Image (spheres, rainbow, N blue to C red):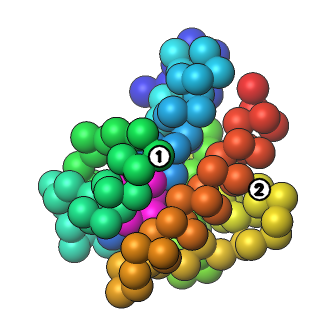
Amino acid sequence: MATPSGKSVLFVCLGNICRSPIAEAVFRKMATDNGEVDQWVIDSGATSDWNTGSAPDARGLACLRKHVIETDHRARQVTKEDFMTFDHILCMDESNLRDLNKKASSVKNSKAKIELLGSYDPEKQLIIQDPYYGSDKDFETVYEQCVRCCKAFLEQHS
C-alpha cells in the first residue's frame, strides 16, 4: 500500500459520504497541484458500514464541482489493515477518534498516527461537523475547513 517514499493518509468520518470524501478529494488536488501526488497513497473510509459502496452525498459532489474538484470515490469501512498500512489517519470529530482508537487497540502492528484533521487548522476549528442534516452552506464550511487543514498537513509532510 505505501509508496516508495512511504507517505500515506486516510481521511475518516462516520459514513464516508460527506466529510472524508471531500477531504480526500481536496488533499488529492493539492498534492497534484504541488506535483507530489505520486509520493502519496490517499484514501478515505468510514467508521460505520452504513454506506459501503455508495457514492458521496450529492451536495458534497456539487460543492467539490463548484471548486473544480472531481472524485469517483465509493464509501468503504476502515479495516484492520488500514492501521498497518497508513502512516496517517485523519478523522473529523471526537466520536470518529474514539472509534478509531478503539479499533487500533485491537491491531497488533498498528503504525498509523490517528489525529483529528482539525488539529491542523490554523483557525483552530478542531471539529469538522457532519453536514449531512444541514444545508449546502454546511458542506461549503466543511470544504473550507478541509482546505485549511489539508494545506497545513501537506506543508508539514512535504
From where the camera sits, is residue 44 visible?
Answer: no
Q: Nearer the viewer, residue 26 or 94?
A: 26
> As rendered, which of 86 and 21 lies closer to the eye?
21
Relative image position of residue 70 (x, y in whole percent): 34, 39
Determine which residue is flagged by label 2: 120
Q: Residue at x 51, y 66 (%)?
A: 140
Residue 42 showing in the rendered view: yes
| Residue situated furthest left in the rendering | 53
Helix, strand or loop for the magenta stretch, by majority? helix
Which picture quadrant has residue 73? top left
The secondary element bearing badge 2 is classed as helix
Q: Mark 1 or mark 2, which is nearer the start of the sequence?
A: 1
Q: Position of residue 41 (x, y in %)?
A: 48, 29
Out of 147 and 54, give the one closest to the viewer.
147
Residue 102 at x, y percent in the picture: 53, 72
Give the residue displayed 43% in from the left and 78% down from the top. Answer: 131
Quadrant assignment for the C terminus: top right
Residue type (three-letter) at the residue carrying disc 1: His
- Depth order, front residue of 124/117: 124
Magenta span of residues: 17-22
100 lies left or right of 127 = left
Picture layout, residue 128 above or below residue 114: below
Which residue, as the protein is rendered here, is positioned at the far bottom?
133
Q: State left or right for residue 125 relative to residue 15.
A: right
Looking at the rendered structure, the secondary structure element under dot 1 is loop
Rendered residue at 65%/75% (across/down): 127
Label 1, on which residue? 67
Q: CA distance from mark 2 to mark 1?
A: 21 Å
Circle 2: residue type: Tyr
| Vertical position of residue 141 compared to residue 6: above or below | below
Task: Tell me which corner region of the image, top left, top right, bottom left or bottom right, holds residue 98.
Answer: bottom right
